[in-house]
Amino acid sequence: MSAKPKVAFFDFACCEGCQLQIANLEEDILGLLGLVDLVEFREVMTGTAPEYDIAFIEGSITRKADEERLKDIRNRAKILVAYGQCAVTGGINKLKNLHSDMMEVRKIVYKDKAAMEHLDTYPTRAVGDVVKVDLIIPGCPINKDEFVSIVKQLALGKIPRIPDYPVCVECKLKENVCRYDEGEICLGPIARAGCGAICPSNGVACDACRGTVSNPNKQAMHEVLAKYNLTVDEIIGKINIFAVDPEVSK
């Protein structure tokens, strides 16, 4: 990789909220531009580039045309980063996979325009389901500080490490009252930390918007549910929101 790596950003099916987080870095973005050469980023600049050292991908894959475009980006990038939960797990977009008939999904969303060719779709896939991903940045949206740290590490040739322990750890460090004690269902025991337990710290249960840890402690989750007289079925809806694999609660 060159001393100043070429960096490009691309988006697929998403709300572009993670790109907005980057655009809103304000003075921090000047520091990053001193480390990398930003060659493509539709949200904030014009122009394209034939190849890149690092490609950041936001959004899930929902069409065959998108799949082919993603593969082309992968072929031209030395490092490919899936950032934001839509790219990492399929995110909220993956809720449509609960329906078996994709045309029915199109009708629900687009009504009488559903048959239009450009609206053709298939079950939502995460970026890693289509191409090799070298690094993920979880979150909905991503955390700006975490993103800045990761870019700096990549620019220096280091391998970034993202937290792989549950949100409950951060909650305990902050001495938060457990949301279960407040009568709420919280996915903290299996959710990936790194957010500073921002939701529980503000009186809201965790929805696992950063996905789950790589080896979630299923037994601990079951023990928490049993303690509060809850069942797995009662948390499935919450698990589905950010495409967390229901298998983690079995």
Image: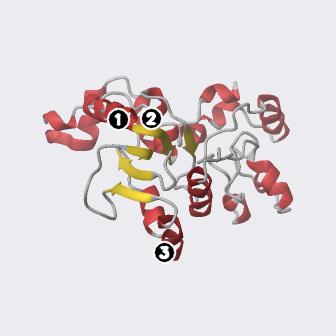
Cβ–Cβ under 8 Å for marks 1 and 3: no
- First in sequence: mark 1 vs mark 2: 1
- Three-letter residue code for mark 1: Leu
The foreground one among 170 and 228 is: 170
Q: Which residue is mark 2?
A: 127
Q: Residue furthest bottom?
A: 27
On the picture, is 19 further left or further right than 138? left
Q: Which residue in the protein does label 1 denote? A: 70
Please provide percent x and percent y for residue 137.
Answer: 57, 47
Tell me the SS state at disc 2: helix
Residue drawn at the location 79% of the way across and 56% of the way down: 171
Q: Which residue is mark 3?
A: 26
**Residue 241, x across and y down, in percent:** 53, 42
Label 3 crowd bin: few (<14), some (14–19), many (20+), radius 10 Å: few
Residue at the image point whose x is 46% and y is 27% from the top: 129
Q: Residue at x 70, y 63 (%)?
A: 203
Spot the residue most to the front: 3
Amino acid tagged 3: Glu
Could you tell me if the residues under marks 1 and 2 are in contact, i.e. CB atoms within 8 Å?
A: yes
In space, the residues marked 1 and 3 are separated at their CA atoms by 29 Å
State left or right for residue 80 relative to residue 9. Answer: right
Front one among 4 and 132: 4
